[in-house]
Every structure is written in structure tokens, then in C-alpha cells.
Image: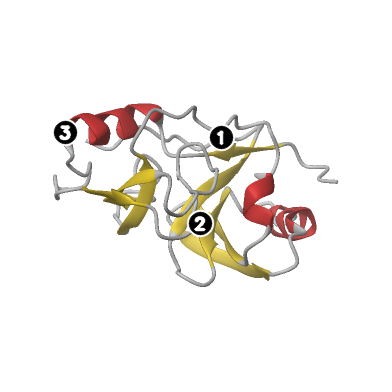
């Protein structure tokens, strides 16, 4: 059980709606691509995994530091092609994402990497607690360890970082 109050931060709804509407990425307007899911990667908005062969998804370029830091670091992400609810930030670590290995990167202001944890057993809470045990850690970026892609951000509930939609 995590003692430090935290919240999970999925890609903002405004960003996802704009991508669905325009089929353009928020980062430099690169084209987005829609396809039938071929694996169980997660949607970065609802944080649920896709069902291969059934769900349709959109692949686009997203800057995981948008609204948080000034230097961009864009990379590929997926969202459902159809409307899905944004993951509720106070719902704890997404259960469907416990199955795969994840990398947790702890950052301080100025995009200073202060710690790194690999979690392969689905027990994320001790790693999150350890990383946030460092007072200077402001947020944690969660990635797929196998694909390297950004999944979502974890923030201190009492010290949220400013994060707005990408232009």
C-alpha cells in the first residue's frame, strides 16, 4: 500500500479528441494512423489493453513531457479509435497493466532523471513509494519495458505538475 498520495495521469481527453477528429498528432501535426489492434498494448487514454483482432486504435506521435517540461521528447502512442473514458487518476495503478513489465523513471523539475525502477512482478506500489521517497522527485513516467513506449505519468497528489494539452 502506498502511503504517499498519488494520482495517475493519462493523456488528456482534449488531445485524444483532437487526434480522433483530425487524424493528426499534436506534435508537429504528423499524420496519425488507424488500424486493427494486433497485440494487447494499452490505450494511453483509458489505460485498458486492446483486444487483438477486435479493437481499432490510432497510432500517433505524442510528447510525454508536454505541459510539464520545455524540451520535447516525442514518441509513438496508441489510443482507442472510438471514444473511451479517461482513466480516473485516483483509481490506483491500472490493473490491466500489472501483467507486463514496466519501467518507472523518476524526474525532478528540469527533466532531471533521479531514479529508475524495473518492475516485472506486477507489484508497482513498493517501487513508486521508493522513488517518491526522494523529496526532489516530482513525477514518474511509466513505460513499457519491452517496447520502450510511454504509457502514463504518476504525480504526487499534493504536488501536481502543470500539464496541459499539446498544441
- The answer to whether residue 50 is left or right of residue 166 is right
Question: In this orientation, which residue lies closer to the viewer: 138 or 24?
Answer: 24
Tell me, for residue 141, which label it has, or none: none
In x, y percent, where is residue 121?
Answer: 75, 67
Mark 2 crowdedness (10 Å alpha carbons): few <14, some 14-19, many ≥20:
some
**Residue at 73% from the left image edge and 60% from the top image edge:** 122
First-in-chain label (2 vs 1): 2
Hey, which quadrant is residue 26 in on the image? top left
Circle 3 is placed at which residue position? Answer: 22
Between the C-alphas of marks 3 and 2, the distance is: 25 Å
* 105 shown above or below 17: below
> Residue 136: in sight, yes or no?
no
Query: In this rendering, would 157 be left or right of 130?
Result: left
Residue 121 shown left or right of residue 14 in the figure: right
Rate crowding at label 3 as few (under 14), some (14 to 19) or many (20 or more) other CA atoms within 10 Å: few
Numbered mark located on residue 40 in the image: 2
Q: Which residue is mark 1?
A: 160
Task: State the SS at label 3.
Answer: helix
Q: For mark 2, give the secondary structure.
A: loop
Real-space Cα separation, disc 1 to disc 3, in angstroms: 30 Å
Residue lying at 62% horizontally and 63% vertically, measured from the top left: 100
Amino acid at each position: 500500500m502506498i502511503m504517499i498520495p498519488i494520482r495517475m495521469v493519462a493523456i488528456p481527453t482534449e488531445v485524444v479528441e483532437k487526434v480522433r477528429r483530425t487524424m493528426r498528432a499534436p506534435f508537429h501535426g504528423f499524420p496519425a494512423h488507424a488500424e486493427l489492434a494486433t497485440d494487447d498494448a494499452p490505450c494511453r487514454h483509458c489505460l485498458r489493453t486492446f483486444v487483438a483482432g477486435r479493437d481499432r486504435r490510432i497510432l500517433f506521435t505524442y510528447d510525454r513531457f508536454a505541459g510539464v517540461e520545455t524540451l520535447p521528447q516525442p514518441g509513438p502512442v496508441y489510443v482507442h479509435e472510438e471514444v473511451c473514458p479517461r482513466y480516473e487518476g485516483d483509481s490506483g495503478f491500472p490493473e490491466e497493466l500489472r501483467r507486463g513489465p514496466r519501467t518507472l523513471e523518476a524526474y525532478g523539475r528540469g527533466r532531471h532523471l533521479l531514479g529508475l525502477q524495473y518492475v516485472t512482478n506486477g507489484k508497482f506500489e513498493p517501487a513508486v513509494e521508493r522513488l517518491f521517497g526522494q523529496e526532489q522527485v516530482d513525477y514518474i513516467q511509466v513505460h513499457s519495458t519491452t517496447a520502450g513506449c510511454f504509457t502514463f505519468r504518476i504525480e504526487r497528489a499534493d504536488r501536481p505538475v502543470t500539464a496541459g494539452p499539446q498544441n
